[in-house]
Image (cartoon, helix red, strand yellow):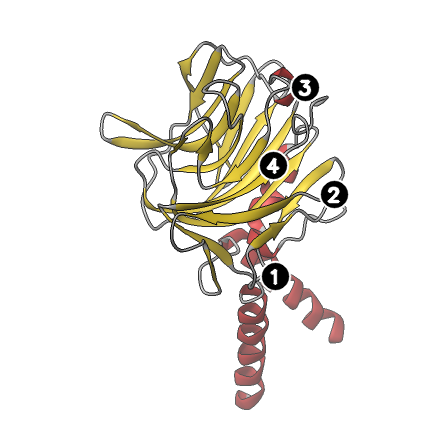
Amino acid sequence: MRKFIIFVFAFIIVLLVADECRSQSVYFDGNDYASEVLGAVFRASDDKGTIIIIGKWETLNDGVLWSVGQSNSSSNWALIASLDVGGSDYIYFVIDEPTTYGVRGSTILQTDTWYHIIVMSSGSSWKIYINGNLETLTVTAGANNGRWFNDLDAGLNVFDFGVLHRSTLSGYLTGYIDEMAVFSDTLTTAQVATYYNGGCQYDLTGQANLVFYARCNEGTGTTITDAVGGLVLDFQAAAADPSWNLTQYFPVSAAGYEKRFKRFDDYKKYKR
């Protein structure tokens, strides 16, 4: 019996570790980024939607996780980044079209900590979730009015990880991006919980209204591929390109593990 118990626990650990080790991330060193040149505004007809991005900052300093922009203009852009307010950093979403509107969250961000970030627009207001929890938002510019891709100017022409790409580059990220997804509609609270609890192992392929999905698990080469819409982000750098990291990735949440153990327990009851 003792050997059986040891075997069962070893089997569970192997399953969980195997699940954990199927992912990886892209590391940005503060001098590089990944970029796709667009032929038109990304999702130009979408007046609402959801962005999920999983990231970790080594250095906060207003580092940008994701942005869309116009490479020959200082206006017409949107981004998700950290924002320093009085020495504390918060998640920040802003859109400039060219009037600027923005909000920040309420969670104080820490370095070397993974965050599962959801920015959602109903078309009239934004919500932000961090690690499955709804944030209290503070307006940083204009109003919380839910502006989205269809509000951006036709001149928008770049889609980037790790930098804000305008006529000049700024907000370089020092840290990691695990994956990013874009939906053309809002998510339910149940979806928010499911996607967060599943960590980076939860495969969003086939989910309703999914229009962009980069898992950042290529592990080799110099491009990040969108599995849904066909965008290809090329590594860009003055010196060394972004690099693949096989040991840094967003883990399954405690609630996600609890569900896995429950499924295993259900299996044992079935076998009896």
Reply above or below: 243 against 64: below
Residue 139 relative to residue 149: left or right: left
Q: Residue 37: give its label.
A: 4
Q: Residue 246: give its label.
A: none
Mark 3 → mark 4, Cα distance in angstroms: 22 Å
Q: Residue at 56% x, 45% y: name it.
A: 196
Task: Return the disc, 3 or 1, that comes first in the chain's sequence.
Answer: 3
Specify few, some or many for label 1: CA neighbours under 10 Å numbering under 14, 14-19, or 20 or more.
Answer: some
Q: Which of pointers 3 and 4 indicates the residue nearer the eye?
A: 4
Q: Amino acid at mark 4?
A: Val
Q: Are marks 3 and 4 in contact (CB under 8 Å)?
A: no
Q: Amino acid at mark 3?
A: Asp
Mark 1 → mark 4, Cα distance in angstroms: 41 Å
Residue toward you, 91 or 64: 64
Q: Which of pointers 2 and 3 indicates the residue nearer the eye?
A: 3
Mark 2 → mark 3, Cα distance in angstroms: 19 Å
Count of all numbered marks drawn on residues in the image? 4
